Amino acid sequence: MSTRKRNKLGNDPLGWMDDGDEARSEPSDEPPQTEASGSDDTGDAAEGEARPARRKAPAKGRSRKNAGSARTETPQQASSEDSTMAEKTQNANASEQRPDGEFLRAACEGSRMSVMMCDADMNIIYANESVVELLRERREVLRERFPGFDPDNLVGQSIDQFHQNPAHQRAILQDPSRLPWDAEISIADIEFKLRASAIVDESGQYRGNMVEWQDVTERNRFEREVARMRSAFEGANQAQMMTDDHLRVVYANPAALDLLREHRNELQGYARDFDPLQPKGCDLSEMYRDAARPGGSQRLPEKHELRIGELQLDLRATELRDEDGNPSGYMVAWEDVTDLRLAEQNIDALIRDAARGKLDERLTPDDYDGFVKNIAEGVNELLDAVVPPLREGSRVMQAMSEGDLTARLEGDFQGEFAEFRDAIHDTIDNLDRLVGQILEGANNVRSASSEIAQGNTDLSQRTEEQASSLEETASSMEEMTSTVKSNADNSKQANQLAVAARDKAAEGGEVVGKAVTAMGEINQSSKKISDIIGVIDEIAFQTNLLALNAAVEAARAGE
């Protein structure tokens, strides 16, 4: 026990309770209270200011509201306070031989409860070691709100330092009819639960107050987290179920109850010992009898698909562990995937049909609900977006194959469909330009061909004329040849006559000599005539060759 001045004052703060020989402590008739606080006083209470609750303590196990929010004491805390109160009652029954002040002082010093007392002027006259230690732990936070706060020197300070509106709080604390008074105050991020009660003497005169302090920061945070989680589970659309470490159901949210109720006939037929209408306490392992169980019968697989006829339920188990890391149960999420599996089959069939070119098939969204209905609508919208561009492209390509280069894709196309449309249009435009260039080239070729044909015609005419001229030349050459031959014959006859004359000339002297000379001249002339005849024959041969070549050229030109 501490020997600080606040615990052993020279002027005993509890000494006034010992005045008179008949003063004795009477045990309280009020039953031990559970953690609770509330307010029926409408006075202004700012942050950090206690809010009053004038009411009798409820029976054990009940909870009371404080400032509109529920606070429920844990069983361990209730048990601890009940034990303390029981010890106090026992000590009170055994205190007939000692003054009440000593008894109360001993009870406060030995108690784990954090107790502070003030006199009628709201000055702190006593603080046990527990409350000092509690405030010492929160010293830094309290000093942010109350500069100069010193938990080691509480005695003698005014309790008003904890109130933003001291007059309001005094009105409550100094009126025993409004006590006991429960409240919770928040200072920065810590929360205290306070219970103020009146101290009166044996005549009923108000002498001060006793205030019990409790740091409920962690407890309230835990309760808020539990409430938040419960709210999340209660409001979740997904069916959630919790089991203990023996796989007995301890909790099922409304969505899970609705799912079990909807399929109760199938589930009862599958597991007769499982009650879908009252699942709490049922053995969930009944739903896993067809599943592989890793690590023994008390372990659940992470995923399991329960098939009961056409019903298909997807069960996903998450193992829960306690603060020591030991398995404490499972959180099991249930999902009815019957429609989803059916939709998957229909979508697979639809995709296979689309791959084979059957693009008229569609799903029926009204056959499904929720997410599956959205999927069906999305698949239909996808096909409705893909099919029109393909059909428009097919129509335009068909027209192009028939020679129509004016056809274009019609409709509003987005993204890659717009690129598809532009690519087809660019192809048609390029093809149109290419065909135009080919036609222009063909026209140029046709014009050149006409000019070549006209030239060939002119050449043919000229060749025919040349051939005619050559024929006339050949005829003339033939006539010349005939004349030359005739001259040759005549020359031969003349040669014969010359020979005869030479013979005759031989008969006479001078006549023969002259004749020989004349014959020599004649012989030279004959040789020249022979040369001329050879030239004429060569000219005739060349003329024939020219005529033949002209005829060949004329024949080619005529083709």
Image (cartoon, rainbow, N blue to C red):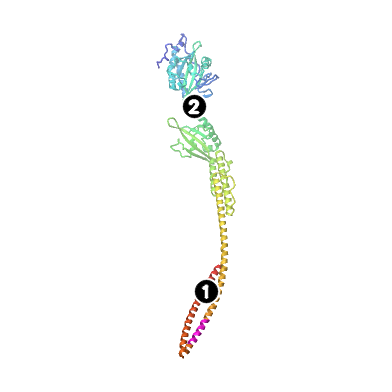
Pick whichever, 292 or 423, lies toward us: 423
Q: Quadrant of the N terminus?
A: top left
| Residue type marked 2 | Glu
Percent x, y of residue 37? 51, 21
Magenta segment, prevailing SS (helix, strand or loop) = helix
- Residue holding disc 1: 543
Determine whether 188 is above or below 473 in the image: above
Percent x, y of residue 490? 52, 83
| Res 223 label | 2
Determine whether 217 is above or below 248 in the image: above
- Foreground label between 2 and 1: 1
Name the residue furthest top.
20
Would you call the spot at circle 1 few (<14 residues within 10 Å), some (14-19), or many (20 or more)?
A: some
Could you say whether the residue bearing mark 2 is in a helix, strand or loop? Answer: helix
Q: Can I make out residue 353 in this image?
A: no
Locate residue 39: give its quadrant. Answer: top right
| Residue type marked 1 | Thr
Q: Residue at x 56, y 72 (%)?
A: 469
Determine whether 439 is above or below 522 in the image: above
Percent x, y of residue 364? 58, 43
Pick whichever, 257 or 203, lies toward us: 203
Q: Residue at x 50, y 87 (%)?
A: 497
Specify start and end residues of the magenta stretch as a single range. 486-499
Pick whichever, 457 or 358, lies toward us: 457
Q: Quadrant of the C terminus?
A: bottom right
| Res 443 label | none
Name the residue furthest bottom.
507
How far apart are labels 2 and 1 at the CA level? 134 Å
